[in-house]
Image (tube, rainbow, N blue to C red):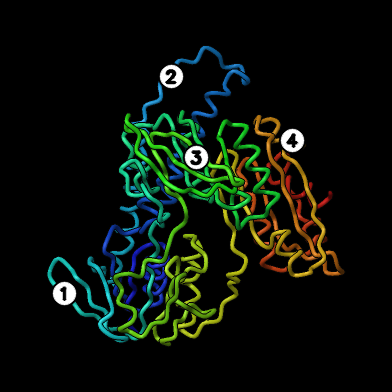
Amino acid sequence: MKIVIIGAGPGGYETALHAAKRGVEVTLVESGLPGGTCLNEGCIPTKAFCRNANMLDELSAAASFGISDLDYKFDFRSVKLRKDAVVGQLRSGVESLLEHKMIDFVRGKAYFKDMHTVCVDSPEGVKEFTGDYVIIATGSVSASLPVPGAELPQVLTSREMLDLEEVPRRLCVIGGGVIGLEMASVFRSFGSEVTVLEYAKDILPRFDQDLARRLKQLLSKRGIVINNQAEVKSIGQKADSACEVVFVRKGKEESVVCDKVLMAVGRRANTASLNLSDAGIAFDSRGICVNEFMQTNIPHIYAVGDVNGLMMLAHAAVFQGMVALDHIMGIKNGIDLSVMPSAVFTSPEAASVGMTEEECKASGMPVKCLKSFFRANGKAVAMGETDGYCKLIVADDQSGRILGCHLVGPHSADIVHEACAMITRGASLDDMRCVIHAHPTLSEVLQNAVHA
């Protein structure tokens, strides 16, 4: 068996490695750097920035821990060098893994000649490849608002934010989703004056509303100005090389002056150069259309990750790739793609898995919401990080099944996985009551919510 995989991001290279370990011959095509957006200009470099931001936050709070008269300088150039080193180390690891004898790693831009043939514009010329199956994993690209001034040099994507030469004094972030809020939080710690403009009535529109509102309060307390229901109308050039972002909120026109604008209004499937129509592959405005096995309308062609528009998360791409590969090989698995954790690496962190309270109400499902707070958690108090809470959503019936978990607070992105495991296995509130937690630990916030 031979599989052609287009794209070497998490969905592509992880699937290639799993296939190779099973003895499947793989041709893996990538036009850019191995690791895709996540490793090279997304998740990993952003988290490197987050760590620097956390260090600065801790230094600013040092006096409360008995450490006074600190003398330190913030060197943004060193921050960038460290970020590049982290990315380089991980990319080198991926490249090493792709030297597997069953993987032919081809560099170049791929497109379909027909439903059976993939062409690659490589440095050596156009090459043609065929396989028993094809998996498309080309990811996504940054979206932009079609407003006047969006093309100005001061308007940046998240990728360009990671390559800035200096910290902007004033930063306007258009979009209050995960990417926008992470960058807003990081650059606030770096010293920027930050304003966030979000079109929806809440930040993090797909998250639990209670979580979103609590996180907004905590970010606002840090000095980040967040305007919801703000419709951006234009971005104008000021005489001093600054920008003016004009927006309408509650019928009133307002503006914010800044030195840089981050356009963080989401991402769109990267399908433009694939020539999908000639292969007969169905797609819409969200991306390539797939079934529950990630199979397109052409049975031997699959699409995983951001390119299918289902859930734009690196770990979603990895597990969708596993589902596709198992389906190709006739293997049944227990992966439940509906239980997909999400994390927001702001300060404080936020994380979510399962159903939101709003989704439960919309479906007419009776639920009860149980809460506990980090201010009552011994480890959090000792750490001096008491902002935030845990919210469990439980079916209000005989089953008592755990349906969702939503957290804001220290290490939420780590804690949420216990709830993820419980929801995946259909555990009940009684099941979770029986799980012993070490004391004092942050994860006790889950146990306390159970006993709420």
Q: Amino acid at mark 4?
A: Arg
Q: Earlier in the sequence, mark 3 or mark 2?
A: 2
Q: Nearer the viewer, mark 3 or mark 1?
A: 3
Residue at the image point whose x is 48% and y is 72% from the top: 322
Image quadrant where residue 302 sits = bottom left
Asked if disc 3 and disc 1 are in contact, CB closer than 8 Å, the reply is no
Q: Earlier in the sequence, mark 2 or mark 4?
A: 2
- The image quadrant of residue 135 is bottom left
- 239 or 340, nearer to the observer: 239
Mark 1 or mark 2: name the one nearer the start of the chain: 2
Name the secondary structure under disc 1. Answer: strand
At numbered mark 2, what does the secondary structure look like: helix, strand or loop?
Answer: loop
Mark toward the viewer: 3 or 2: 3
Marking on residue 184:
3
Which amino acid, by three-letter code, is at mark 3?
A: Ala
Question: In front here: 364 or 132?
Answer: 364
Distance, label 4 to label 1, CA atoms, is 61 Å
Residue 231, given in percent of the width and then of the height, sits at: 52, 49
Check contact, mark 1 vs mark 2: CB within 8 A: no
User: Which secondary structure, mark 3?
Assistant: helix
Is residue 233 depicted above or below 60 in this figure? Answer: below
Q: Of callouts 3 and 4, which one flags the residue occurring earlier in the amino acid sequence?
A: 3
Where 115 sits versus 422, above or below?
Answer: below
Give residue 47's mark: none
Q: Amino acid at mark 2?
A: Tyr
Label 4 secondary element: helix
Q: Is 4 placed left or right of 424 in the picture? A: left
Expressed as whole percent of the image width and height from the top left, the position of residue 276 reads 34, 79
Residue that mark 4 sits on: 375
Q: Which residue is mark 1?
A: 126
Q: Which residue is mark 2?
A: 72
Are there few (<14), some (14-19), or many (20+) residues within 10 Å of tag 3? many
